[in-house]
């Protein structure tokens, strides 16, 4: 059984601890946070767990097999590097690192040490994304045409990153998971109205074979939207993550174009059939993910959301950042 | 009273004729179409109107004061030019022309001849857009931050233009009307999956003062969406044009950022108050627009949706076309 | 071919004429209305049709095979009786008559004269109701448990009848069509707030085998609702008639109760599976219905929406009226 | 400070304890439950609280000022009676008692002993219901016409009561709170399909002055609905409790009827203006309610949700039960 030290007990850390504890209370060995107040909360909830403000205690503790890093992105590299150097497996919050170079260095180090890195792309473990992946894999949707996501709400503003680094990693990890090939080019546009960082941004990702992904992220929206359209040659779907039931609707709709010989105009025909909303499993994504991490560490199997997956997301964010500064100039990955 | 000759009685032409006829049956003098079948439909509906397949009959008829051009965009220039040369006012379908150069030539010609050009940006006459304009003008929304529109559906594929030329003119005319300044730069991305033309496209328009507009247009969507978010400093709104009632919802929501002296971190506070859905007038937009055309011609007043307005939209379309080909490179207007 | 005389060209009559005309212009022989203004409208739309304010001209015209009666309910009996006595088939607006006794007399007269009566229960010819009937007939829903409809909006107040006579006939005809057995008892409650007639009313109909129907009708609702829940042993459905697409959603949900021997408490288990929205045909209901009337008259076949069907609806309305006056006392049909 | 003994730690009890603990951990003195498993859960969450399976320990403990009774309805009377006899205040789950006679006996006993009874009509403390009450009190809605609620979902089936006793108390307590006068008569209809108890039921309540309330409760619905329409002379509202935001929408819509002298037909005119969605406070209702209980006990003030309020709800349930058995016969309260 993999025993954890958790670094970071702010907003998301408690969810990691709660799920590890639900799997097996002995998995949680120690919790580290800079804030005494956060540590007090941890102590009340888990009186038997060791707490400390000193991360190095966890990084060197022989009773700890894996370090969960749930801290701001600019701290990921140092903590993960130290953890790997001390022979610990790493479970790290998304985005993986601040730069692609850092990600590559960590991947190389983990390989050398034969250790597991898992990037916490939680959405890949939700019932909705697993169902969509299944519909892609079993050919229900047919060849993919586009992935178009809108992920907007009011706030929460972050001081150190723009809205792309905050909201886009979710969709970037999902797109990466569904499309399964590397991006060819990235275009980003946007504007900032309040604190200098972009608070409204748009990102287009070109994939081979005319597949296109588009992300609309916005911290200044009056309403919360979490809706994704996915178009395929055979079927199309709408994923509304705010729906309690019926998160996914699959439409038997499409367009067929026939170019008959000698006929100038293409013949376009539309299909419009039934809609079908498959049941989506309600298991908590994070619990599934942490169990999967445990399995990967024990079996030595590389997780699909490994360092490489994290690197691909960071590369797209870096490219988007550059493109955003250049007002939409395509940045080739 | 302005008497019309209508060229083009396909999909949209009958709406023009129906509304002119409702204002005053004597306004409709003659109808021209290349299709005998379309002309037969016109005859059944308006037995007293002269019909012909020869446009030059209308263009030279001394009983006709204005020509309504409701034909494919590539025919607009020649027909409008001829109409103006013959001393007729022009009411022309959007987009105004295929190129900015054509638009400029027509504007110059109309000025010289002291004739009126109105581009049929019908949406500007809907109750919804008029209400939004009012909320901008009276300061309810405060300084504008962004305009973000999603206008997607299944089909209808057009053979001669891509999805930008088909669906974007609506929002471009609205954005132009609301923001009231010229675009600084345009970025467009997209992909085509069926007949060579882009069927999925995204367009970002940079305006002075950090105002940004974004358009999501798509012929391959399983569902029809007509939703626009507009963010302002004081209030934000959602316009859902598919709602029968409550098309516009105004939210008393926003973000305030205070940078106190000597304090490193900006203080962000969120406002979240009531929502209010103003009643939107239900008068048919086209009827209002055609009455307004009549008034402008009779008074010699220049319409706000004049040739210049049409030119600005065409410029943005041209820029988007170029940017699309260059994978998002910003094109400066 | 059955040729019609239409009596009543107010709100609904023009739809009857338009559809008859679309099937075959020769089907419309003459139109009668008391209002000269309505007749003028008819003349403009159908210049070749004979118009008159004198119904007896139509009732005795040898060129007319059938009379369509699209007038207020209190006039139905006299007009239908006269039509039948003159050997004309009858297509009559719902509700069939003001009293069950009148309906019975007309049925008896039509049988004696070997003439067809069809009551215009238009909803039975919509794609939605036909699909629901199919789901009942093919066993998809399983044994029916309940039919629960909400049909509310603001106005339109009628001067001569209460909200039950105005809005309930739609659902009563649908329930009658789906359940296929006679009601055992009817309970109605309600209140009137403006002109003495009930403007808010509720109606429960008890059917054999524990099947229950409930109707919520209201002229004083701020929003328009047209939603029906139908529960069956195997599946349940929601029919929202205001949806453009996805009018019908079929849920694979239900409850199973097992009483194991010797166990005091019943075991309840819930099924919650996929949802499925079958495509609903968009053909105009009234056109289908009028073609069916033509077929029935020509073949001598009795329509399923015949006088008996109209009678059953009137009986339920009469019972509801009585129950309403007695504050919910069950009235046995 | 009022110190509590809580009897019942099943589904709802933990919410009571959590909120009392949040107000002040010392408020929770002891917890009783018949199930050792439930008590173990309580111990893990609140290690310092005394636990027992013997209710009499709490009922006689001199350190306890008030007993919270969160058990099945058929146990309420005995527990509350014993608590009052031992000088304890009572906070009791809804419905108050199984019969009106029991409720009256408890009220009389509490008065004699000068003790407080509060019935847990939690909904009265939600932001939504408080806002609606305010709109009634300040005259915004005008004279009330009707209250029409739909409260349906799949399960959860209860073994000892029918769907009326399970789901109707919520609305009954709200209606009682908003209308503020005693019901004149109650009519209930319904049917049971699975375990002998009604699982689908409808309830009409006649109030003085033509005010009518209607409740639609159903354990066999494929979808969850929590929607209430409230019609008033001046404005109307829709309360959708499943909406995250915009729970309440107030419509400036209505009907005016004028009877002009000498004119036979009433003149009906419709108003249709803006819609407005007031912000609803998000404070947890139960926390507010428990603080209010504390205040009432300390000040000796009688709560508005006192035993009399609980009694009025039980009377309506009893009347509905009787009416249901008699197929809708009106039962006069």
Image (cartoon, coloured by chain):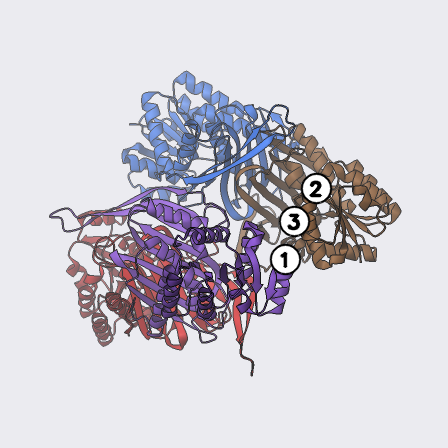
Chain colours: A red, B purple, C brown, D blue
The residue positioned 45% from the left and 48% from the top of the image is B127
Which dot marks residue C36?
Answer: 2
Q: Residue A125 occupies which quadrant of the picture?
A: bottom left
Q: Chain of mark 2?
A: C
Name the foreground residue: B95 vs C278.
B95
Looking at this view, name the residue that lies furthest to the top: D112
Could you classify mark 2 by the number of other residues whose Cα lies within 10 Å: few (under 14), some (14-19), or many (20 or more)? few
One can see residue A240 in this view: yes
Element marked by disc 3: strand
Q: Residue B55 occupies which quadrant of the picture?
A: bottom right
**Left or right, residue C127 beside residue A253:** right
Looking at this view, name the residue that lies furthest to the bottom: A262
Q: Chain of mark 3?
A: C
Could you tell me which quadrant the C terminus of chain D lies in? Answer: top right
Residue D60 lies, with reference to residue B238, above or below; the image says: above
Q: CA distance from mark 2 to mark 3?
A: 49 Å
Circle 1 residue: B48
Circle 3 residue: C144
* Marks 2 and 1 on same chain: no
Percent x, y of residue A296: 33, 69
Which is more foreground, mark 3 or mark 1? 1
Percent x, y of residue D149: 52, 37
**Left or right, residue A127 beside residue C229:** left
């Amino acid at each position: 059984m993999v025993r954890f030290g958790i670094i970071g007990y702010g907003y998301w850390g408690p969810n990691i601890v709660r799920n590890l504890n639900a799997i097996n209370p002995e998995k949680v060995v120690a919790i580290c946070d800079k804030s005494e107040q956060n540590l007090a909360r941890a102590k009340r909830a888990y009186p038997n767990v060791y707490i400390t403000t000193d991360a190095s205690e966890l990084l060197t503790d022989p009773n700890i097999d894996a370090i969960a890093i749930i801290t701001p992105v600019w701290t990921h590299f140092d903590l993960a590097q130290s953890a790997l150097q001390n022979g610990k497996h790493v479970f790290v919050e998304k985005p993986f690192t601040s730069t692609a170079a850092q990600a590559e260095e960590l991947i190389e180090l983990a390989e050398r040490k034969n250790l597991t890195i898992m990037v916490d792309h939680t959405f890949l473990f939700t019932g909705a994304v697993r169902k969509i992946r299944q519909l892609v894999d079993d050919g229900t949707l047919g060849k993919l045409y586009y992935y178009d996501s809108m992920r907007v709400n009011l706030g929460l503003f972050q001081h150190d990153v723009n809205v792309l680094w905050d909201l886009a990693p979710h969709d970037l990890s999902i797109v990466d998971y569904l499309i399964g090939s590397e991006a060819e080019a990235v275009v980003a546009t946007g504007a900032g109205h309040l604190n200098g960082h972009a608070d409204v941004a748009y990102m287009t990702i070109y994939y081979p074979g005319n597949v296109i992904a588009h992300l609309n992220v916005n911290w200044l929206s009056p309403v919360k939207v979490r809706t994704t359209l996915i178009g395929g040659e055979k079927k199309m779907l709408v994923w509304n993550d705010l729906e309690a039931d019926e998160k996914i609707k699959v439409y038997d709709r499409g367009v067929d174009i026939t170019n008959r010989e000698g006929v100038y105009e293409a013949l376009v025909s539309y299909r419009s059939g039934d809609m079908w909303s498959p049941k989506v499993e309600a298991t908590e994504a994070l619990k599934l993910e942490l169990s999967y991490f445990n399995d990967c560490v024990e079996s030595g199997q590389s997780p699909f959301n490994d360092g490489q997956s994290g690197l691909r997301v960071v590369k797209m964010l870096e490219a988007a950042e550059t493109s955003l500064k250049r007002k939409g100039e395509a940045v080739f990955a």
